[in-house]
Amino acid sequence: MALGRAEQLVSAARLEDEPLTVFLADTLGWRFLLSLVLSITLWARLTLDQNPQRVDVYPTEIPVEARGLPANLVVANELPTVRVKVSAPQESWRFLEPSSFRVSVNLDQAGAGIVQPEVTVETPDPNVRVLEITPAKVSLRVEELRTVEVPVQVNQAGSTPFGFRIGDPLIVPPRVQISGPSSAVERVNVAQVTLRLDEARSTIDRSLKPEPRGPNGVVSGVRVEPQNVTVTLPVEQIAGSKAVSIVPRIIGQPAAGYWQGPITVDPGTVQVVAEPSVLDTVSLLSTADIDITGAQAEIVRSVAVQRPAGVALVRDQPVTVRISVLPLQGQQVRDLNVTVANVADGLSVAVSPAAINVTITGPQPTLLRLTPDVIGATVDATGLGSGQHTLPVQVQAPEGLRADRLLPSDVTLVLAPRQTASATPTVSAGP
């Protein structure tokens, strides 16, 4: 009986607590839910304020990738690019790159001809949403994949230096495979490599990339396999070249009283070519004979360059030779009578010595033509009165000559009144 009473008391307590539990659950549940919603809203607002959403067109055009194309087909035209409009948080925009997008078209159902598949864009960042693709479709020309073999051709650009010779090129491999769209492959008839010869003085051994070409020039959009070929071009020297001096060959002598002066040659050197063994023996070349017999002035001649057998000139042209012909310097010794100038009226003059010895220096041709009347010795008696005077002698030499030594250089003048005849007195006769 006591046990039953206890159960009744417990049941009564439960009945009394049940309204409170329901009240607390109803009240606290709604409040918690409201707080949670407010917290999420506040967090979202703060997040958007700190990292706002940005909607914009990505600034770089992104190339389109073709996927799923059957192995026997190939896209013949150049794959286009597209622009992508995306929505992403500002923080995500900072890390976007063209590689962040995979832009592609699915061609697994394509056949030969013109196709216009839709463009799809994928990005690994879940925060980045693609909103728009421009253009949404692209036009592609699909053709059968074709492969052919063509020969490799060497284009020799420039020319080898003088004295060198080239042989036949060796190309490994001599043929390459061209693969790509059939319309492009059928225009290719050769794969060309270019080899410059301007500085080639020894065998050339190069690895070069062949360029597919046709009648109208370079063909693009095809693949060359292998991508490089080896070209060996023999280069050998068949003649050497060097610059040598030119020595003029002069014969004869200038006229009497003249001598041969400096000689100039223009150009002073020439470039010669010969076999290496012959070239080693050539140190200079001479001109044709230049005769200066009887010359009295500069001689200018245009003469040919003489060359030995087996030697050639790079530029076979005459040279200009200038030969100076100058008069020899000489001396003459002459006795000259001294002339007194400007003697005052009424005075007589006596000179001692009456003649001097003069050494005249100058060009020999001029000395040979010198006559006594073109040179003289004088003293000037201007302002001198009676008496004895010692005066320097002046010698007037013609142009180009000079008086180097006078013996003596001074003479003595004696000036005296000039005597006149005296009158004879008349004696008259007496008555």
Image (cartoon, grey):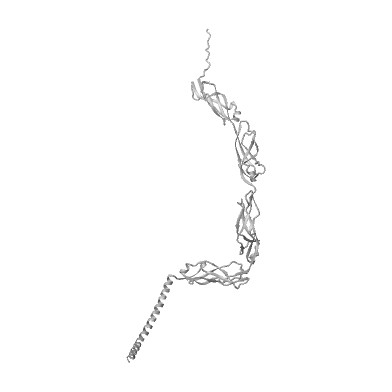
Question: Is any part of residue 217 visible from this angle?
Answer: no
From what the image shows, is residue 305 above or below residue 34?
Answer: above
Q: Residue furthest left?
A: 2
From what the image shows, is residue 32 above or below residue 265?
Answer: below
Q: How far across and down, in percent of the image, does residue 281 sit?
A: 63, 42
Q: Which residue lies furthest to the top in this view?
A: 431
Q: Residue furthest right?
A: 309
Q: How far across and down, in percent of the image, does residue 157 sit?
A: 62, 54
Is 69 left, or right, of 2 in this rendering? right
Which quadrant of the figure contains the N terminus? bottom left
Q: How far across and down, in percent of the image, does residue 249 sit?
A: 64, 37
Q: How many labels does the image show?
A: 0
Going 53% across and 71% down the picture, which residue do you hit?
121
Q: Considering depth in this image, is 217 or 350 the residue closer to the camera?
A: 217
From what the image shows, is residue 333 above or below residue 33?
Answer: above
Q: Considering depth in this image, is 333 or 218 the residue closer to the camera?
A: 218
Q: Considering depth in this image, is 30 or 418 the residue closer to the camera?
A: 30
Q: How far across and down, in percent of the image, does residue 230 sit?
A: 61, 57
Instruction: Write down the quadrant of residue 226 in the picture.
Output: bottom right
Question: Is any part of residue 361 visible from this angle?
Answer: yes
